[in-house]
Amino acid sequence: MALDQTPPLNSLGFAKAPGDTRVVVAMSGGVDSSVVAAMLAEEGYDVVGVTLQLYDHGAALAKKGACCAGIDIHDARRVAEEMGFPHYVLDYENVFKDAVIDEFADSYLAGATPVPCIRCNERVKFKDLLETAKDLDADCMATGHYIQRKMGANGAELHAAADAGRDQSYFLFSTTPDQLDYLRFPLGHLPSKDDTRALAAKYGLSVAMKPDSQDICFVPNGDYAAVIRKLRPEAADPGNIVDTQGTILAQHDGVIHYTIGQRRGLGIGGLADPLYVVRLDADRKEVVVGPKSMLATRKVPVKEINWLGDTPLTSRSEWHISVRVRSTRPPRDAILRPLSDTTAEVELLTPEEGISPGQACVFYDPESSRIFGGGWIHRG
């Protein structure tokens, strides 16, 4: 009887030796992606580090802690030198501006609350960079995201990270099945960020104690208004703050300074009950305010759905799932009612406050850690 000579699967899921497996690691210069690259290099994989220059070096150098700024490119290169693998910097400034920054500005002006990190993953990192990895004859691409890829009966599945506090599934819902086949997330199973830093120290990485980036990379100090004023000067035009009946209550100095659910800084005093921003009308230059009860939403229209279930979205009239409508909120019970392959209505069993067009609605299996994809909230 002939013996099966197939080699066992390596840690990235390939039936060959690590040295025969090329992996491109997307390196931001931070501790997470640096640990991924170092870990795979130590395991003997043929590692190639790639860092994307996403926006102007001059502006980037002035901002510490931002992804892919000038200092971060230097840090990524230094890690590659320390671990002995090649590293390349790719200029994606034009792609990033067209695919992410311009839409961010336009969405904000339209009264939405955009999430540019999702679009960056969808349109730049997991699209153009992934194709570059394939051009480099890599078997897969690895990132430092906190999310898990698990093999199921029907192929690769997307699962939340083991550490709920670090889970990045909200930002990765638009990962397609084809992309998921090619991607690897070596940190998703770690119990905590402390474990990642311990690995960085173990490998002697210069970035071991580097602080995490908190802000959107091209928004210095979280000042959305300054960025949008530069990109779309008309956004700073003054206008009226009105109630839901259209009565003028006060003036504002640009809709870019307001977000759905905001209560402070409206300049409206002497009222028995506080008012909140319930809608932004950029065309009319109006900030619409109302009572807190108007912020509670039960039915959420969703479009551009990326579905990751085992059977088609429209194979059922209803799906009982959990959804996350903000990155900072836990999943809540909901009913998903498909309208087409890419559109649906989500009914929240408990109304949520502050839901805004432009944010993501991410679908979870209430019985496991699996992610069923998600879509974009719109006005309906």
Image (spheres, grey):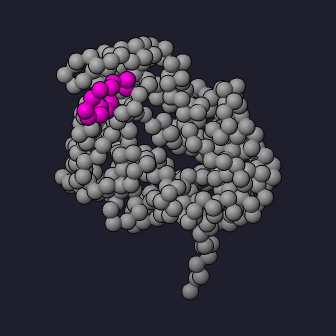
Residue drawn where x is 71% and y is 31% of the image: 61
Q: What percent of the width, then of the height, locates residue 261?
A: 35, 36
At horizontal 43% and vertical 48% (from top left) the residue drawn is: 328
Residue 31 falls inside the magenta stretch: no
Residue displayed at 27% across by 29% down: 271
Query: Which of the pair 295/228 is nearer the observer?
Result: 295
Magenta: main secondary structure: loop
Please state which of residues 157 and 378 is positioned toward the viewer in this rendering.
378
> Residue 131 lies in what quarter of the image?
top right
Q: Is residue 131 in view from this perspective? A: no
* Residue stretch in magenta: 266-277
**Where in the figure is residue 169, as x and y percent of width and height?**
46, 52
On screen, residue 43 above or below 50: below
Using the image as rendered, state which of residue 64 and residue 310 is in the foreground.
64
Left-right relation of 127 to 45: left
| 43 is higher (above) or lower (below) than 55 | below
Quarter placement of the N terminus: bottom right
**Residue 106 x, y percent position in the rendering:** 42, 23
Q: Is residue 4 left or right of residue 254?
A: right
Is 274 colored magenta in this rendering? yes
